[in-house]
Image (cartoon, grey):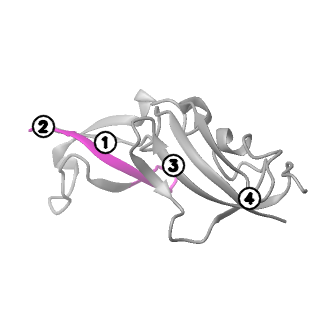
Amino acid sequence: MTQVKSGDTVAIHYTGTLLDGSTFDSSDGREPLEFVVGSGQIIPGLDVALPGMAVGDRKVVKIGSEDAYGPLNPEMRQAVPREGIPADIPLEVGTQLQMQTPDGQAMPVMVVEVDEATVTLDANHPLAGKDLQFDIELVKID
């Protein structure tokens, strides 16, 4: 029976949950996720869990934040003056916005705090600082 090794292209079905059981992503109802093992295309903690698996194998993998989307970086939060944001932009907490970096790259941010003078934007990945769990099933090895 063929087992996954680094460099193999694999396809998995998965459900990703937070440790409280709430689902943040799943391939349910979609095509399986396909990627090259060990290439850095997925989070490190999931990448290292696949070698040794065979088609049809299932496993549950708990991944600490450091091997998922990393820790929360306080430098990725910034308070900006309200007057610096166009009036037609919604500023409710939880709103996803897109900013432009000095070199022209688009960067997603979330409104995390609003007061009369400032709006605090967070550019951390929404899952940064969170420990995760994945229920995975290997469906293909190429």
**What x and y, as percent, mark residue 46?**
66, 44
Q: Are marks 2 and 4 in contact (CB under 8 Å)?
A: no
Q: Are marks 3 and 1 in contact (CB under 8 Å)?
A: no
Residue annotated with mark 2: 115
What segment carries the magenta color? 99-116
Foreground of the two, 7 or 53: 53
**What x and y, as percent, mark residue 88?**
16, 63
Q: Amino acid at mark 3?
A: Gly
88 relative to 100 in the view: left or right: left
Q: CA distance from mark 3 to mark 2?
A: 34 Å
Q: Are marks 3 and 4 in contact (CB under 8 Å)?
A: no
Foreground of the two, 130 or 56: 56
Under circle 4, the secondary element is: loop
Residue annotated with mark 3: 16
Front tag of 4 and 1:
4
**What x and y, as percent, mark residue 40?**
72, 48
